[in-house]
Image (tube, rainbow, N blue to C red):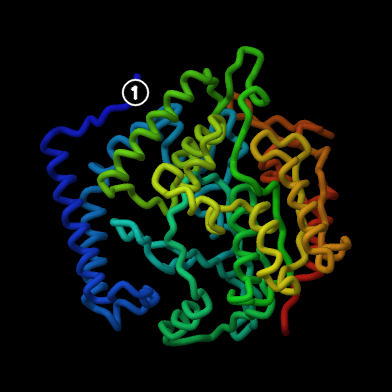
Amino acid sequence: MSWTPSWTSEEKKELKDLQKRNEHREKELTKIFGTDTRPHKWYWRNEFPKAAKLIEYAQEDATRYKGLVQKELTKLYTWPNLEMTDDHFFTPGKGIFATFDREENWFKKMGFYEYQTHYTFSDSWDKEMMPVKILVPNDLPVGHKAPVMWFFHGGGYYKEDGCFESGFTKWTEWLYKQIPVQNFTIDKDHVYVEGESAGGQAAVTALWLNAAEDGPNLPIDVALLRYPMIAHYKRRWDKIADKDGKVNYMGVCFTKKDVMQREANITDLTKWLESHSLVPTCSSRWPSVGMAFAFILSVTERWQWYFQRQHSLPKAKRDELDYMDGIERANNTQASVLHQLLPPIYIFHGWNDPNCPIDNTQEFVRVLETKYPERYNNDKNLRFDIVKRLAVRKSGNPDGSINNEYSSDNVGHGFDYWLNETEEKFLRNAYDWVGDRWKTSS
């Protein structure tokens, strides 16, 4: 059964009025800034108060009408069921997900202070804030010159938003000025970048943007990519289906017909929201909520179509750099990046990863070796470890107990979550390699 809008006539009127207010705000912003490139958004509150007030109104509207705008989206991503899409389903997990044993205050337990600020806001109608979370060791000595780690977590994503704000180094300078007392120093000369799964793609994008001739050109000591989603997310149904032709998601099996129908509904709803300029920005979601669409679009091989927004962009724009995956970016930009600013890279990947095929990572490594021979011609600057066996592999049982499988060759995706560095040689090698290159100035 194909998707049809279920908003009532009164609700549609509210959405239409919201659309009109959005259009009015955009016209007012154009009056303030003209059609030229707009100033960095972090300056708006102090230097362009009228523009900042318009953004506040947009955000208030987005909050007020969030439930109405996302009414149909909520139905589609509440999948497989309501319980499994609860925000706290994995914190901690139960039953077969009992290995996800970290609670919400895990960072605090591990000895970190947590801070959050906002880097920018989306260009979409809702002007959603883009948060940056900063973790600081609580035993960091006052005045210590602290090296920086940028971590790009996984969890999947499925739609590019186009709200990237350039000028990061200017933002950090501005941010420092907002802090009245500074008893710490960030060592920007020693940066480490790590990305896992979908975060591996984000990390590669960041590394290549930084090394671009017109990029920030920050010195990055080293990078670690863990089972990266380095290519457009695509999983072939015939390769991952069981003997009955079904695929497993969150412990529930689905037929191809079921998944194809949900993907068609997602497409129809997205087009409807786009036609009304009401596609909401999603800067973050809990994994239990956010992974469903990424899974559905990958196994129906529609992920790339969504990421490149082919449903709304003219064909000529589909090959723009912003819509490339990690392999394409490395392959097509070797002439426009400063090779010496690309850091040493360590990559490890499970040999039978069903989510992010190891073939893609092997192709990425081949591109680095052939297109960047002076930078990545030896294992001092490029290491690729195919993990074929784990000393201990943990899995959850339906009753919530943990099963330990020793000397396991079941090395799929996200396999390092529970591992002990002292037991797993590949993990120890990876972090020793990183540690040898990520130094402090003091």
Residue depicted at 16% across the width and 46% down the height: 16
* 36 in relation to 298, above or below: below
What secondary structure is found at the residue carrying circle 1? loop
- The part of the image, by quadrant, that contains residue 270 is top left
Residue 146 coordinates in the image, percent (x, y): 64, 78
* 304 sits left or right of 354 in the view: left
- The part of the image, by quadrant, that contains residue 378 is bottom right
Residue at the outermost top position: 244
Viewer-nearest residue: 392 or 41: 41
Residue depicted at 41% across the width and 42% down the height: 311
Tag 1 residue: 2
Viewer-nearest residue: 122 or 390: 122
Residue 362 coordinates in the image, percent (x, y): 78, 46
Residue depicted at 53% across the width and 30% down the height: 300
Q: Amino acid at mark 1?
A: Ser
Say if residue 110 shows up in the picture. Answer: no
Viewer-nearest residue: 354 or 217: 217
Residue depicted at 60% across the width and 64% down the height: 206
Residue 69 coordinates in the image, percent (x, y): 26, 43
* 77 sits left or right of 375 in the view: left
Residue 218 coordinates in the image, percent (x, y): 64, 77
Viewer-nearest residue: 14 or 302: 302
Sort mark 1 into few (<14), some (14-19) or many (20+) by Cα contacts within 10 Å. Answer: few
Residue at the outermost right position: 378
